[in-house]
Amino acid sequence: MTNEDNILIKEKGSKGLVEKADDSSISIGICFDENLVGTNSIALTAKLKRNIYTLPDYHYCSFLEKWHLFSVPLNIGGKFEGCLTLASFGEPISDEMALITDLFSYKMTNELKNIRNKTDTTKSTIHLTKKQLNILKILASGKTGVATGMTMGISLGTVRYHKNNIFKKLNVESSTQAIIKAIKSGLLSLDDIDC
């Protein structure tokens, strides 16, 4: 699998196939950009945004001279995210294997879309004010309600008022739950918390 820059980020296969890939200088981190290594199925798939099957004679880069490659674009939300490529050393790729690769890429992209949609939905449905976020950050650092009020220059009653609103918005019952939910939903990061 390659990323949007045509860099190999994941490889999987039998021990013999991985060894042949290593012998051909194909390993994690190699870039298949056409300008760097010559024409190949991954570069063509990235350029044309469609499935490409290339025979060894049609790769214009020496390290692929014995490889059959079938590449499928991974498009998520209309954006090219990389390629899923089936590789075979010296043997043609069957229609069945090409179909399985195409179906697998479809399943991968749909699952990634669903994950991203869930994350986007979670982030967009919870809105805390700047003051509420500041109170949550201070509480996350371990300070009490009194210390939080002193840090922010507000009364303990105001701190409690904001905490109750935070709990309602996040649908939680304690400061600990609020902090965890805020981190999970992307409202806070661990870097925001001073310990």
Image (cartoon, grey):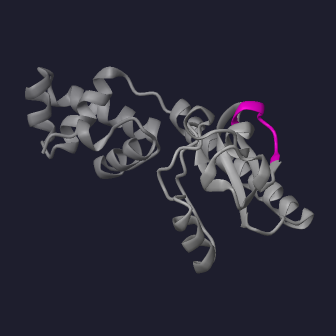
- Give 126 or 145, whichever is nearer the viewer: 126
Residue that lies at the very extreme toward the right in this rendered image: 95
Relative to 185, 189 lies left or right = left
Q: What residue appears at the point 78 percent right and 51 percent down from the top-left corner?
A: 57
Residue 39 position within the rendered picture, expressed as x and y whole percent measured from the top left? 69, 39
Image quarter in which the C terminus is found: top left
Residue 162 position within the rendered picture, expressed as x and y whole percent measured from the top left? 30, 29
Q: Count the marks.
A: 0
Residue that lies at the very extreme toward the bottom in this rendered image: 15
Q: What residue appears at the point 13 percent right and 29 percent down from the top-left corner?
A: 149
| Image-quadrant location for residue 116 | top right
Residue 106 seen? no
Residue 144 seen? yes
Within the magenta stretch, is there residue 47? yes
Relative to 149, 73 lies left or right = right
Residue 167 position within the rendered picture, expressed as x and y whole percent measured from the top left? 39, 40
Within the magenta stretch, is there residue 90? no
- Give 19 or 164, whichever is nearer the viewer: 19
Q: Which residues are magenta?
A: 46-52
- Give 58 or 135, whichever is nearer the viewer: 58
Q: What residue appears at the point 55 percent right and 51 percent down from the top-left corner?
A: 8
Image quarter in which the N terminus is found: bottom right
- Give 172 or 64, whichever is nearer the viewer: 64
Residue 151 position within the rendered picture, expressed as x and y whole percent measured from the top left? 9, 27
Considering only vertical position in the picture, is 138 above or below 155? Answer: below
Relative to 48, 141 lies left or right = left
